[in-house]
Amino acid sequence: MKNKIEFGSWEATALMINLVFAQVMLIFPKDMVHFGGSAGWMISIIITLITLIYFTIVVKLYKNIGSLDLIDISASVGGRIFKVVVGLLITVFLTLVVSINLGAFAQTFKIISLDKSPLEYVGVLFLIGMLAAAYYGIEVVARINAFLVPIVIVGFILITLGAIPEFETNNLFPILGDGYASIAKGSILKLSVFSSIIILFFMVPFFKKQYLKKVGYSSIIISGLLLLWSTLSFILVFPYEIAIDKKVPIFQLARRIEIGNYLQRIESVFVLISAISAFLFLGVIFTFIIYIFSKTLDLKRSKPMILPMAVIVFSLALISKRLNIELIGSNALNLIWLTGMALPLVIIIMGAVKKVGVKDNGGVKNGQKN
Amino acid sequence: MGFLNSIGKYIFYKEQKGKEGFVLKENKAINCETAQNIASLDVFDKKELEGAFVGCTVNDDILKNNISSDIELNKKIMMTTYDMPKNTDLLYREFNITVKDKVLRSFIVFIDGMTDRTVISNNILQPLMLLSNLEIKEKPVDVGEFIFNRLIPYNQIKKVQKYTEVISNVNFGGCVIFVEGLEYAFMADTKFWDHRGVNAPKSETVIRGPQEAFNEQIRANTALLRKILKDKDLMIEGVTIGKRSNTPCAVMYIKDIANDSLVREVLKRVKSIKVDYIFDSGELEQLIEDNTFMAAPQILATERPDKVAMMLAQGNVAVALDGSPFVLVMPATITEFLHTTEDSNIRFPYVTFIRMIRIIGIAIALLLPGIYIAITTFHQEMIPTNLLFAIEAARENVPFPCVVEILIMELSFELIREAGIRVPGAIGSTIGIVGGLILGQAAVMANIVSPVMIIIVAITALGSFSVPSFSMSFSIRLIRFAYIILGAVAGFLGIALGLVLNSLLLASSKSFGVPFLTPFGPVTKDKYADKLVRQPIWKQEKRPDYLNTKDIKSQPKISRGWSVKDSNEKDED
């Protein structure tokens, strides 16, 4: 009976796509319009290209590193203390990501679906999903992503296709929207949508290393296309002035669909698919928090950590909502989110310099476990 | 006088004799220590230990001894073990065999009703009692060998050395022959009892395909499989389960296809079971499955030999148990529960269509009531306005909320279904009519439920009938209630939560090392052409990747030789 976690490239790709796609369901298209106006769609192309360049660099660097994740690399580079520091930093970062997104999803679903229920109630429903995901572990979570994410994406595409009769090409003009500066600013700040790429560098030991390239590129490209299509369809339906005020963009898009008098207001379908996407997003990040935290502190059993960590995440999510701080979409937070891309790059550069985990004359350098 | 007596009964008090009712008392402690602690056969000869077995059973350790050459001792052991003559269906017959000038005392033991009496009389008793008197030309060197070679003209006979073998064979329709002076016994396989023949399947009917089903006879079942597969590499390994029942069980696989570790694991699990009795493969399924607490089944139980044969050919392992008309096949993933044998017998476009219908049926059976509750409670805007008016008008006089309404209807439907199965066949259809039509109509007229709800429950029931597997259908019926509750408490968000939790549960479970959701989660190599949609039969070149079979190819790339022009034909042209 093997205890090793293992999954294929498709599972990893689907998981990564959803980590980006869940942002589309929240606020991403609106942010694009906020930064770029009618040229918001360009930002999604630019950030995809930047991420592709970033990933190409990482892949090049990974040639000098074995099948190690960020914790293993930091342990090999700077010893146990460095490993603990990096591990805790990533845990805190991901805890922040998951708690802010938990609050945002709870708030969104309260607005669009459960308007009479208290926020805590909606939050608890998401929390149950997160707890279950963490209980079953990374392998199982990756497996369900493999078949649920395609369903979610097909649902999303159908919604946007249903909105095609509402498309107004005039909305794309002026072609450069608010100008170069705004597009550039938006491209840097909204690069944060790919901040969850940090998770990819924890999955390297789970799939064969040669698939890193395939998983990374395919997930970035598919996610980029989804970002582009979501922004484009949002801008095409809503003129800039109206779009800037829309709270949940794709939901608003779904509300506009009307095909005959039998298919109208299919925003509830959006509720279903975005809820699945949200459960998967929160579940994946929370599962990885437990995994990273346990690995950082060399805990033999990770399950006892699930409940305390859930309490922390839930409390943080509620605090930000109680204090009425609008975190999602704020510039400061967008910059913090970039840690998800910067931190792995730094660690991977250090690992590549020391060539950790690379087989050296038949042996393994720097203590990679076989 | 009689009249006076009758009057007297009313005037004078007469004490009634107390009538003592039966009380199930605890067994009196019988001291079986002597019987249990002895392992030597001497006990049967000792006068002082003669009463040691009264009320006690013969210890297995004694029976593990080798058979004695003393015919009297053997007789005592058999009589004591089976508690003869109290045990009336156990038959015992003494007779003499003449070998050359010697007369040897012998006896046979068999169970009446489980053995073929004609065979015992004509092929065992008659030759032993009569043939032995004929003049023997050769010089008998060994009495046992002479009896075996010349005096018992029966095809299925073997020598057994231990009493345990004797007992287990007699229990399963054998006839044992003890002969004076021999340290072994002859065991004739004379089993014969009334049984059901090979009938048409009852729970897995098909239009196109064989109409045979397994019955309760293990040998008949294995023969049905051999008949279909006709493969020399089909292995049927025998195992017995049950400390007391010694129920025969067959583990079947094709040795050059099935994965060795899978075969070992199945054998390990089956052999490791320690129960007194086992009655059906349903019990065996529960004893060997990976996860007992999961709603979905993890082992496929089928009554169709062709289905088992197909799965054996694809690399699965099957287990048949004597007395059960259902054979277990493992590992079983979600696809196996969605397929029928008919799928391979009809053309692939039809199969693809029918599978889509089946999947829609399953989705309806699982989700429709929950989604209806979610829509009517939280997402009314989804319903077209005219339909919304109609639903509201129909519900106007119903005092219950939707969720109560649907729970009443679902529980009533389950009640009707259960009652329909339990009542005798003749009135089974009446239950359906009374329960389904009259009760439904009356419930609507009494404003207990709305007509839309009847439609929802009826469509859900139709959906659940489209599930090919009986066990899977059960699991869907159970989980449906969870979706109803989730839909009622959180609308589509609740349904989404249910889908995620359900997916986690299914994705975490394994059937003999194979993840249950294979080939969808984890995704396996796409060469296997019979996942959700079935490809043309000539494209099905590979066996399922997840079974890790020894031989992955089930047919060459070009399985239809005629589709390629051969060289001879070219020459002729």
Image: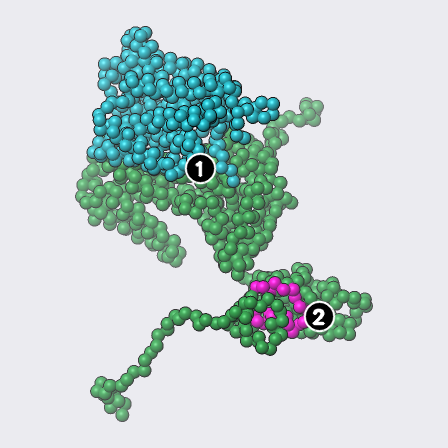
Chain colours: A cyan, B green
Residue A359 in sight from this viewpoint = yes
Q: Which residue is painted at 24% across and 90% down in the image?
A: B4
The number of callouts visible is 2
B473 left or right, relative to B125: left
Tell me whether marks 2 and 1 sit on the same chain.
no
Q: Which residue is painted at 55% across and 67% down in the image?
A: B37
Residue B67 magenta: yes
Q: Position of residue B77 (x, y in %)?
A: 60, 70
Tag on residue B51? none
Front in this rendered view, residue A342 or A271? A342
Density class for disc 2 (Cα within 10 Å; few <14, some 14-19, many ≥20) is some
- Label 2 chain ID: B
Q: Position of residue B124 (x, y in %)?
A: 67, 67
Q: Which residue is painted at 55% across and 76% down in the image?
A: B51
Q: Quadrant of the C terminus of chain B?
A: top right
Span highlighted in magenta in the image:
B60-82
Front in this rendered view, residue B567 or A354? A354
Q: Which residue is painted at 27% across and 86% down in the image?
A: B14
The main secondary structure of the magenta stretch is helix
Tag on residue B181? 2
B230 left or right, relative to B134: left
The quadrant in which residue B94 appears is bottom right
Front in this rendered view, residue B11 or A111? A111
Eye-nearest disc, 2 or 1: 1
At label 1, the amino acid type is Lys
Q: Which residue is mark 1?
A: A300
Residue A127 magenta: no
Q: Is residue B431 above or below residue A153?
A: below
- Label 1 chain ID: A
At label 2, the amino acid type is Gly
Q: Position of residue A98 (x, y in %)?
A: 33, 28
Residue furthest to the bottom in view is: B1
